[in-house]
Image: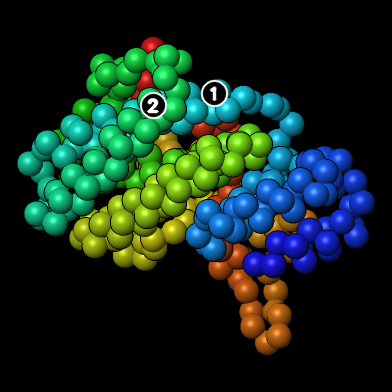
Amino acid sequence: MNIYNLLTQIEKADPEIYERLDSRRAVFKHFAGFGKKLAATAIPLAFGAMLNKAYGQTTTRSVTDVLKFAYLLENLEAEFYKQAAATDIFASAAGKGAFETIRNHEVAHVNFLKGALGADAPTYTADSFDFDAKGALGGMTFKDYPTMLAVAQAFEDTGVRAYKGQAAFLISNNDVLQAALQIHSVEARHAAHIRRMRRDFAAAPADQKPWITGKDRGGLPALVQAIYDGEEATTQAGVKITGTFGGISISDAAASEAFDETLSTEQIQAIVTPFLKN
């Protein structure tokens, strides 16, 4: 991705782009710094976050607000995987090993965010969360393997879209943004692996992919539809990306699979509230 060429093209269409963000010099310097720190695959996400800040979200959240929000989500996942990995309902040793690895990652994320927040870090324990979603899962979350995998997928898919949505509020702090993008990448790998585990399980959808297609919730109950709504987007940065280009046809499904859409703070709160005790 040639960021500088894209910025030049956007500037031609919107001469006020830098008034929405920062000075032209500061923006170019910002991305020059990114190039030294981030993997090439993370640059499009950072660029998208910047555009989202300019044209999308209107509310302002401090870096501490975002870190506290991420800390809640990471504690939710960490406590879930602690309990899940301790069960004996796995279909294979490899599945149990995967959950133990993801548990370790989530605990590391919790510890990292706790260190970043310092005295501002709230206290969460296993009793802070309701993994039965107020009874909606019938008490089967840690008793039924497909149900446990489904909850894991719901949490991971939420995490991927949540980090992307919050990245726009971190654009002023390179260090925190870099850390958030790295955690986002780990969450995306978790999501892909869990989705693969569900596909390989006999009772799961045979066409389950490692990524989201449209707003398909992949056989999960309607309770989690809000996690997937909005993923069916086929327009990016105001440009429709479906159709035939140079003899190559891009379908609605393929276009939606190419991008993770953001979830707003309010949308994420609505999704996770059933899993919170207070």
Inspect the image, locate mark 2, and give the three-letter code of the amino acid beneath it: Gly
Which quadrant would the C terminus be assigned to in this image? top left
Between 249 and 80, the one lying in front of the other is 80
Q: Are marks 1 and 2 in contact (CB under 8 Å)?
A: no
Q: Is residue 213 left or right of residue 25?
A: left
Picture quadrant where residue 42 is located? bottom right
Q: Secondary structure at mark 1?
A: helix
Using the image, determine if residue 81 lies above or below residue 32.
above
The residue indicated by pointer 2 is: 115
Between 249 and 158, the one lying in front of the other is 158
Density class for disc 1 (Cα within 10 Å; few <14, some 14-19, many ≥20) is some
User: Of tags 1 and 2, which is closer to the observer?
Assistant: 2
The residue indicated by pointer 1 is: 64
Picture quadrant where residue 148 is located? top left
Q: CA distance from mark 1 to mark 2?
A: 12 Å
Which quadrant would the N terminus be assigned to in this image? bottom right
> Could you tell me if residue 232 is visible in this image?
no
Q: Is residue 127 left or right of residue 184?
A: left
| Earlier-in-chain disc, 1 versus 2 | 1
Q: Is residue 92 left or right of residue 123?
A: left
> Which residue lies most toward the bottom here?
247
Q: Position of residue 256 (x, y in %)?
A: 58, 60
Between 35 and 226, the one lying in front of the other is 35
Q: Measuring 42% from the left and 19% from the top, which residue is drawn there?
A: 118
Q: Measuring 10% from the left and 55% from the top, which residue is drawn there?
A: 92
